[in-house]
Image (spheres, rainbow, N blue to C red):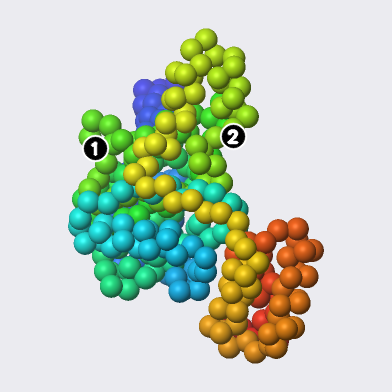
Amino acid sequence: MSNEAALSRIAAALERMSPPLAPVPDFTVPAYVWHIEPDRLVPVKRVNRVDVGLLIGIDRARDTLIANTEQFARGLPANNVLLWGARGMGKSSLIKAVHGAVNAKHENLKIVEIQREDLPSIGRCLNLLRGAPGRFVLFCDDLSFSHDDAHYKSLKAVLDGGIEGRPDNVVLYATSNRRHLMPRDMIENERSSAISPSEAVEEKVSLSDRFGLWLGFHPCSQDEYLAMIAGYCDAYGVEIDVATLRAEAIEWQATRGARSGRVAWQYFTDLAGRRGVRI
């Protein structure tokens, strides 16, 4: 093999080991999605979200998240936030809605979505955002970890910041169905089988403690469920008799075996389609 060919192979190997730096995006849109291979921030021209006023039954979580986000957008201290609890109750919808509401007043506020499986690259994402114009909410949806999952160690780069520190212009908002980000049976298994049970559990469970704010979401009542649907009808101009709406909505939730904000939206989507209303 010639020296030139050997050098080419070495250069290619080094490039695979150390990905090229992500191009600096044009930070003029309010939302981005982080992708890897190659690293890049992809602008999102239109965010899929509902108005914050349409989120019913989560007033305390809404007000707390808005206040924290307002502080952050103004350059004041703000906490990382973990939104945990019942599925379908609007955790990710609230993050996107609050970003939209605060961005309307503070255009410097951006949101960057990162997938859970891309957490090992989060340090590279932070390096790109560090010093960039604007304030960035790093959004990770449906965050959880299995017994042998080491991705949680990458997350500490955002929560603790390491020696370099988390960028002042970045906070992390994450959603999870689990308060401690791992299944309860795995926590109990660690306690029962580890040589040092408390230490084995502490490393993973304490990850959630690194979020400054915990916002809990719980199953909604039937009245809240019906109020959600009525709010959607008012917002999109769908007219229906109250008794008919109630009967249909209750039947819909019975067939789904669940009652949540997601089920309310799915019923309303069906209703709007039958009534010929675009949403």
- The image's mark for residue 192 is none
Does label 2 or label 1 sit earlier along the sequence?
A: 1
Residue for badge 1: 165
Task: From this view, report whether residue 194 is shown above or below residue 51.
Answer: above
Please indicate, yes or no, whether residue 174 appears anywhere in the rendered image.
Answer: yes
Q: Tell me residue 117's x, y (percent).
A: 52, 41
Q: Horizontal placement of 248 versus 200: left or right?
A: right
**In this view, 104 is above or below 188:** below
Give the amino acid at mark 2: Pro
Q: Quadrant of residue 42?
A: bottom left
Residue at 44 percent across and 51 percent down: it is 215
Q: Which residue sits furthest top? A: 195
The answer to the question of whether label 2 and label 1 lie on touching residues, with beta carbons closer than 8 A, is no
Q: Quick check: 112 above or below 28? A: above
Q: Which mark is residue 183?
A: 2
Compared across the picture, whether 194 is left or right of 123 comes to right
How far apart, in angstroms, are the residues tagged by discs 2 and 1? Answer: 30 Å
